[in-house]
Amino acid sequence: MKKVLVVDDSLSVARQLEKIISESGDFVCVGHAKNGAEAIKMNHTEDPEIICMDMNMPGMDGLTALRTLSVMDKDVKVVMVTSLGGVGDKFTEALKLGAKNVISKPFEAENVLRILREL
Amino acid sequence: MAVKFFGQFLVEQSIVSRDSLIMAIDLQEQKNLKLGEMAVSMGYITQTDIERAHNAQMSKDMKLGDLLVEMGFLTLNQLNDVITRQKNTHLYIGEALVQVGALTTDSLLQHLADFKADQAQYVSDGIELPGTVANSKIWEMAADLTYKMITRVLDLQFRPGKCYITDVIPSNFMLAAMDLSGDVEARYLISVSENLQKAVARAILSEKSVENEPVEVLEDTVMEFVNVVCGNVAAKASQMGVIMNINPPVTIKPPAGGLPVTDGHTTLCFPIHIGDGDKMDLILQIKN
């Protein structure tokens, strides 16, 4: 099973994503980071294959963390899961910084899993 | 189930690849001239004129086109010519995807129809604001999208009350707030009664019961609802040409007498009637 790290300051979003991931049978959630800095640390300690990361977080935001992760770890695949996905500039910036896809909130479980399986 | 732009819809649906979309966006950036660049290409102004107008923009809150007219570099007719040329020659993302070979012209039409159907649920039916409020179209859209998200995300039936201007934010069990910045400055707030907080939590967590959830999780679900609505409002605003940045949400416990509004702001309250004794308000505190 592929290891997934969830990065979101919201407890409720982390709960939703962890539930979707753990019930999928294809993925296992290896942890929950609450901001970009924690995500970088947990990427090192948990070595996930996929990171699902919010853009808008207090402290280090998702795009800053994505920029760092894309330099530090060429193998990890990052998908942004964000309410800002529909803002064209943010979406384009995320893709250009190396995100594999961007999922807009509110999301549906099947859409999240389809995108993770296609990575 | 969110406000999207066409390129994002195509990537999410695996119709075009991420790399193709980036190529198409790069092509758009090459072909779609900014207002100043277009005016130069039409021979109306020089690069030096643009630089002088950009410098003047640092001390004047005006759009470049208006400033070029005010500074005498462009006539109003020339500005209109430039804007018309920009519109007529604009390369849309769908056309750019055809040009980079990611879509055919026929499939583009079908995908555009599918996209319009997907986004039809977010087309505004119109909301009336009291008095004269700056950027009223943006705030009407914000209220409209909030109503749609209450139905679609929270699965709650409701009746919107008449919007009014207030000096005090009405008290309620809890408030979740998000500051909006950019072309507009405002604070977006949602207040909920205790029962509605649980209804929001049940919907956001997809749980039948939230009776054993800790307070911080219940509060977080209301903040997350605000986050989802405001992110989608920012997406709609960007489609309307308005830059809106969102900040992490916060919770507020309002005093029994309500919260006085901040000086220099117009505060709009949209009562949302849901059920017996259940109260929700949308409050927009807009900087004047």
Image (tube, rainbow, N blue to C red):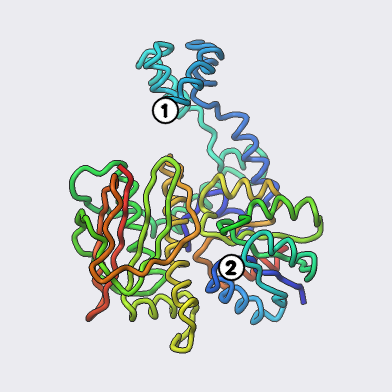
Mark 2 residue type: Asn
Mark 1 residue type: Lys
Location of mark 1 (residue): B63
Instruction: Tell me if B30 is positioned left or right of B285 in this view.
Output: right
Q: Are marks 1 and 2 in contact (CB under 8 Å)?
A: no
Residue B98 location, x and y as percent?
A: 61, 41
Marks 1/2: CA distance? 40 Å
State whether residue B141 appears in this view: yes
State whether residue B12 appears in this view: no
Location of mark 2 (residue): A111
On screen, B185 above or below A75? above
Q: Which residue is more in the foreground, B220 or B40?
A: B220
Q: Which residue is more in the foreground, B91 or A91?
A: A91
- Measuring 21% from the left and 56% from the top, which residue is drawn there? B166
On screen, B188 above or below B217? above
Image quarter where the C terminus of chain B lies is: top left
Chain letter for the residue marked with disc 2 in the picture: A
Instruction: Tell me if A109 is positioned left or right of B23 in this view.
Output: left
